[in-house]
Image (spheres, helix red, strand yellow):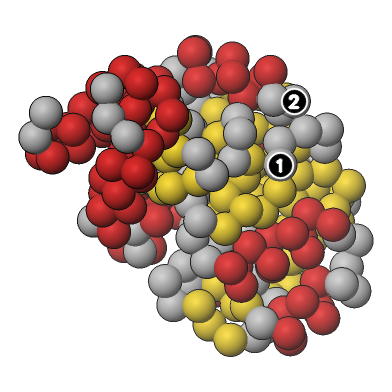
């Protein structure tokens, strides 16, 4: 089998199975594990997959910049954002992460709601500037331009002073084995701090993030983590996430 054919086979296996294991592939194709690992390294360098110990996972499409992410699953993000907005109860203090789905959430907060939103996303803060009943606390720090959020020591210090009811988190990947992931290490630290300062975490999980993984782990799936998904989310992938310990709530299109 030619190198090009092997790589096409690997990509096809990732799409159908959600992961590839180097040892299994080497046995299936009658090749050495070193050959398969070399193919995985080259495919990772081309930005086509995420290598993990023993194999690879699909790379998260949501690693695109903010403008690029605005074009991904727009209808599903709007639906998830609206459902998340209706989870916020009067009088609560909530963290809202950065990202395009988070902006949709801010946009759909009921006009009658009185609550406090703490966010490190200028985009979310600007969206809420005209909301009369929502107190907005903007966390400062170094602007991570890729995601348009504040990161760094100053942001961590502010987050540590707040205790929130719920953290509405954005991620680039949600995978049964890899857990919740993102593409930047410093951003992962911020998200972990926001989780630690919250009673519960709701992950805004648009379909392109399900079964995908990025390089930096935020947290495993498990108790205290709810995945808010669209009705279009693939049932097979959701079953694997439930088995890994995640609670899954489907956004209601009629709500």
Where is residue 100 shown, x and y percent of the image?
45, 54
Q: Is residue 106 above or below residue 211?
A: below
Quarter-wise, where is residue 201 in the image? top right
Judging by the rendered image, the residue that carries numbered circle 2 is 245
Q: Within 10 angstroms of label 1, few (less than 14), some, or many (20 or more) residues?
A: some
Q: Quadrant of the N terminus?
A: top left
> Residue 9: x percent and y percent?
21, 27
Taking 238 as reference, is 226 left or right? right
Q: Nearer the viewer, residue 82 or 24?
A: 24
Q: Which mark is residue 99?
A: none
Q: Which residue is at 9% across, 35% downward?
A: 2
In the rendering, at what x and y percent does residue 17 appear?
40, 21
Horizontal side of 250 relative to 114 (left or right) equals left
Rendered residue at 44%/77% (across/down): 145
Do the residues under discs 1 and 2 have CB atoms within 8 angstroms?
yes
Decide which of tag 1 and tag 2 comes sooner along the chain.
1
Residue at the spot x=87%, y=72% of the render? 160
Q: Position of residue 193 (x, y in %)?
A: 78, 64
Question: What SS does tag 1 mark?
Answer: loop
Viewer-proximal residue among 106 and 18: 18
In the rendered structure, find residue 220 and report the number of the disc placed on it.
1
Cα distance between the residues tagged 1 and 2: 9 Å
Give 12 or 101, whichever is nearer the viewer: 12
Residue 87 seen by the camera: no
Q: Residue at x 74, y 25 (%)?
A: 245
In this picture, residue 213 sits left or right of residue 193: left
């Amino acid at each position: 089998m030619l190198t090009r054919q092997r790589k096409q086979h690997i990509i096809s296996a990732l799409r159908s199975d959600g992961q590839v294991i180097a040892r299994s592939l080497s046995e299936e194709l009658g090749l050495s594990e070193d050959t398969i690992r070399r193919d995985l390294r080259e495919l990772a360098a081309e930005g086509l997959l995420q290598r993990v110990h023993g194999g690879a996972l699909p790379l998260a499409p949501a690693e695109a910049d903010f403008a690029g992410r605005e074009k991904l699953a727009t209808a599903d993000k709007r639906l998830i954002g609206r459902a998340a907005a209706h989870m916020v109860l009067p009088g609560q203090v909530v963290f809202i992460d950065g990202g395009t789905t988070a902006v949709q959430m801010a946009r759909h907060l009921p006009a009658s709601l009185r609550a406090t939103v703490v966010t490190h996303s200028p985009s979310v803060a600007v969206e809420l500037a005209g909301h009369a009943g929502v107190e907005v606390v903007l966390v400062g720090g170094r602007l991570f331009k890729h995601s348009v959020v504040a990161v760094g020591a100053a942001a961590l210090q502010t987050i540590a002073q707040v205790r929130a009811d719920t953290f509405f988190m954005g991620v680039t990947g949600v995978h049964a084995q890899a857990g919740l992931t993102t593409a930047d290490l410093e951003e992962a630290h911020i998200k972990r701090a926001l989780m630690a300062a919250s009673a519960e975490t709701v992950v805004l999980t648009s379909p392109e993030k399900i079964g995908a993984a990025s390089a930096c782990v935020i947290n495993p799936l498990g108790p205290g983590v709810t995945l808010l998904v669209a009705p279009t989310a693939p049932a097979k992938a959701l079953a694997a996430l439930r088995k890994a310990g995640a609670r899954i709530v489907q956004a209601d299109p009629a709500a």
